[in-house]
């Protein structure tokens, strides 16, 4: 999946683009709209906290850091066992998994409170009243969807494609 970013001038244009996307078999759950506070989005598919926060990137970093830390702690425990205890290789695996889980959880808790760093470059336009739309499509449909938007809406700014997005949010 790839995430496409569009800046739309107003809610009415956004509504028209969403309608066209739905008619072209883009599921509503793959469309995410962000607007300045006070702009009524009504029936448009609003972006969730998953899309508006840094939860996913932070959790990925925490998973990696926690896993590495847990593996190192497990290796130290096996190499230098405490006071006559015999610790096997299962301790390395257990500490790696525990460290990865703990790291992902802690970093995720921090990330949910931070604005999505990928959306920072659009903040000025959103504050000025434009509407940001994120559309998740399979890689093979990126050009098709961009052409669809270009052909019907000259006033829409196509802001690019994010190469990879997580499948689960």
Image (cartoon, helix red, strand yellow):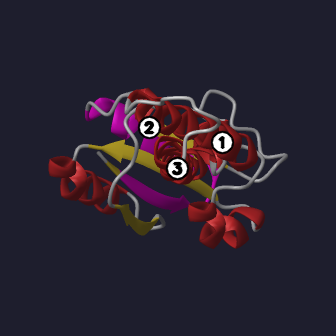
Q: Residue at x 39, y 48 (%)?
A: 165
Q: Find the residue positioned furthest to the left.
A: 140
Mark 2 in CB contact with mark 3 (< 8 angstroms): no
CA gap between label 2 and label 1 equals 24 Å
124 vs 71, nearest the viewer: 71
Q: Decide which of 106, 95 is in the foreground and name it.
A: 95
Identify which residue, 70 or 168, lies in the foreground: 70
In 3D space, how far apart are the residues under numbered discs 2 and 3 (Cα atoms)?
Answer: 9 Å
Disc 1 target residue? 108
> Which numbered tag is attached to residue 92?
2
Q: Residues within 10 Å of mark 3 (few under 14, many from 20)?
A: few
User: Eyeballing the image, is 157 above or below 86?
Assistant: below
The dot on residue 76 is 3
Q: Position of residue 143 (x, y in %)?
A: 20, 58
Q: What range of the chain is rendered magenta?
A: 3-24
Quadrant of the image occupied by residue 109: top right
Front: mark 2 or 3: 3
- How packed is label 1: few (under 14 Cα within 10 Å), some, or many (20 or more)? many
Q: Position of residue 95 (x, y in %)?
A: 52, 35
Give the mark nearest the N terminus, 2 or 1.
Answer: 2
Q: Is mark 3 on a helix, strand or loop?
A: helix
């Amino acid at each position: 999946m790839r995430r496409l970013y569009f800046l739309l001038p107003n809610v009415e244009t956004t509504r028209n683009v969403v309608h066209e996307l739905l008619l072209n078999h883009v599921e509503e759950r793959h469309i995410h709209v962000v607007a300045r506070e006070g702009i009524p989005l009504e029936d448009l598919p609003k972006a969730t906290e998953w899309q508006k926060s840094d939860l996913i990137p932070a959790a990925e970093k925490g998973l990696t850091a926690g896993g590495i830390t847990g593996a190192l702690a497990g290796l130290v425990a096996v190499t230098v066992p405490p006071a006559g205890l015999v610790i096997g290789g299962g301790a390395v695996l257990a500490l790696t998994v525990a460290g990865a889980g703990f790291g992902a959880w802690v970093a995720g808790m921090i990330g949910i409170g931070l604005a999505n760093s990928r959306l920072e470059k659009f903040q000025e336009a959103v504050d000025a009243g434009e509407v940001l739309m994120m559309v998740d499509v399979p890689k093979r449909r990126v050009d098709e969807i961009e052409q669809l938007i270009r052909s019907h809406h000259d006033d829409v700014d196509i802001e690019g494609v994010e190469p990879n997005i997580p499948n689960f949010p």
